[in-house]
Image (tube, grey):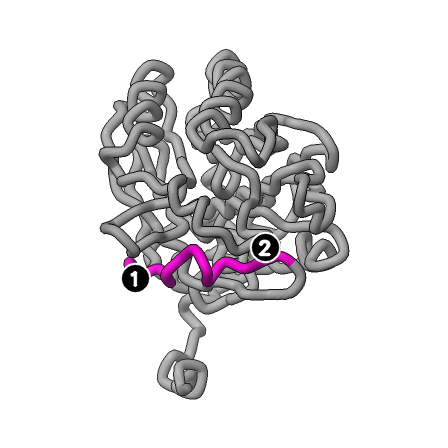
């Protein structure tokens, strides 16, 4: 009998004015997205991933110290603590991307992983930090991740996380595969005209190269006052053959649910022996400065 994993990803627009108090912004976005979490539970979703920095707008479109107030501790901050209760209530693994404070001035773009019993399993910190014109000023807000590329053993399988800009770098995607990932989630915030032509190339390629599923998440809408472009949604799942098997629209809040046949991982890896045929002793130039 096949091992089927019912997985979900959630894309949404920012529902709060950017000049509102930050705690009000967070509450409004969480409240908006909770109805989709409830829908996921009704559909029997076993693992659900939110989008990058899901409680706020993409404020990295400007450089303003005000947004440092959005940081939270992980796991002891309010959002992750609340999501632990939600995960336990619904028996659902949750991937929760938030703005993390390790200590004052040490801030990261982070995703917390919560198991189906509500237990906090650990976190991934975004490794590759963009600083790009126009409007992606992330080095103003985040230190580069320093936790490597962990894979988390959850109630539903082995999960890896790659965050947004990370997806342009195949090296970490390969490490996640070598570390045993069965599905990699990539919560993102990306706009049309910049990287849309890569959106359905890179991540299916990671899936093929490493023989795992990918859940790709992008927010939707145009966020004032920055208006750096349209966050074009089209969140999706692809299988280890690189085939997109479920996809969202580009312009509305949406929960995407897919039944993932996890037995396909073994089938694909046994056919394409990329891990067997690797030549790591010849790849030294990749890590030279």
Tag 1, which secondary structure? loop
Which corner quadrant of the image does residue 76 belong to? top left
Whole-number angstrom distance, CA of label 1 to CA of label 2: 23 Å
Work out whether residue 25 can be spotted: yes
Q: In the rendered structure, does residue 146 fall within the stretch colored magenta?
A: yes
Say above or below: 216 vs 48.
below
Residue at the extreme top of the image, as rendered:
42
Q: Kindly identify the residue that appears in the image at 25 percent across and 51 percent down.
A: 104
Most common secondary structure along the magenta stretch: loop
Residue 156 relative to residue 241: left or right: left
Q: Residue beneath label 1, please?
A: 146
1 or 2: mark nearer the eye? 1
Q: Kindly identify the residue that appears in the image at 52 percent across and 26 percent down.
A: 29
Residue 60: image tag: none
Viewer-side residue, 210 vs 114: 114
Q: Residue beneath label 2, please?
A: 203
Place of residue 150 in the rendered image (x, y in percent of width and height, measured from the top left): 31, 54
Viewer-side residue, 155 vs 137: 137
Say above or below: 242 vs 38.
below
Tag 2, which secondary structure? helix
Quadrant housing the N terminus: top left
Work out whether residue 2 can be spotted: no
Place of residue 24 in the rendered image (x, y in percent of width and height, measured from the top left): 47, 25
Quadrant housing the C terminus: bottom left
Label 1 crowd bin: few (<14), some (14–19), many (20+), radius 10 Å: few
Q: Give the range drawn in magenta.
A: 135-148
Q: Kindly identify the residue that appears in the image at 58 percent across and 36 percent down.
A: 18
Place of residue 132 in the rendered image (x, y in percent of width and height, measured from the top left): 60, 65
Q: Kindly identify the residue that appears in the image at 27 percent across and 40 percent down.
A: 73
All told, the count of numbered labels is 2
Place of residue 202 in the rendered image (x, y in percent of width and height, measured from the top left): 62, 59
């Amino acid at each position: 009998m096949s091992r089927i994993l019912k997985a979900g990803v959630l894309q949404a627009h920012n529902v709060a004015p950017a000049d509102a108090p930050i705690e009000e912004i967070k509450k409004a976005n969480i409240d908006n997205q909770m109805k989709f979490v409830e829908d996921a539970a009704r559909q029997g979703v076993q693992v659900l991933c939110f989008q990058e920095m899901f409680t706020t707008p993409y404020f990295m479109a400007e450089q303003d110290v005000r947004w440092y107030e959005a940081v939270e501790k992980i796991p002891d901050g309010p959002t992750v603590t609340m999501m632990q209760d939600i995960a336990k209530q619904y028996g659902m693994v949750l991937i929760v991307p938030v703005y993390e404070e390790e200590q004052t001035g040490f801030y990261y773009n982070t995703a917390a992983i919560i198991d189906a019993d509500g237990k906090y399993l650990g976190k991934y910190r975004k490794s590759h930090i963009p600083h790009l014109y126009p409007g992606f000023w992330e080095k103003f807000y985040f230190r580069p991740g320093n936790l490597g590329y962990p894979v988390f053993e959850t109630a539903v399988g082995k999960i890896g996380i790659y965050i947004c800009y990370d997806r342009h770098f195949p090296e970490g995607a390969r490490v996640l595969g070598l570390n045993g990932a069965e599905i990699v989630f990539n919560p993102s915030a990306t706009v049309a005209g910049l990287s849309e032509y890569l959106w359905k190339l890179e991540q299916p390629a990671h899936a093929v190269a490493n023989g795992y599923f990918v859940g790709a998440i992008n927010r939707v809408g145009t966020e004032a006052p920055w208006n750096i472009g349209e966050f074009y949604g089209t969140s999706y799942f692809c299988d280890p053959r690189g085939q997109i098997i479920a996809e969202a629209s580009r312009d509305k809040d949406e929960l995407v649910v897919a039944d993932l046949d996890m037995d396909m991982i073994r089938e694909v890896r046994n056919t394409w022996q990329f891990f067997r045929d690797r030549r790591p002793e010849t790849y030294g130039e990749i890590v030279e400065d």
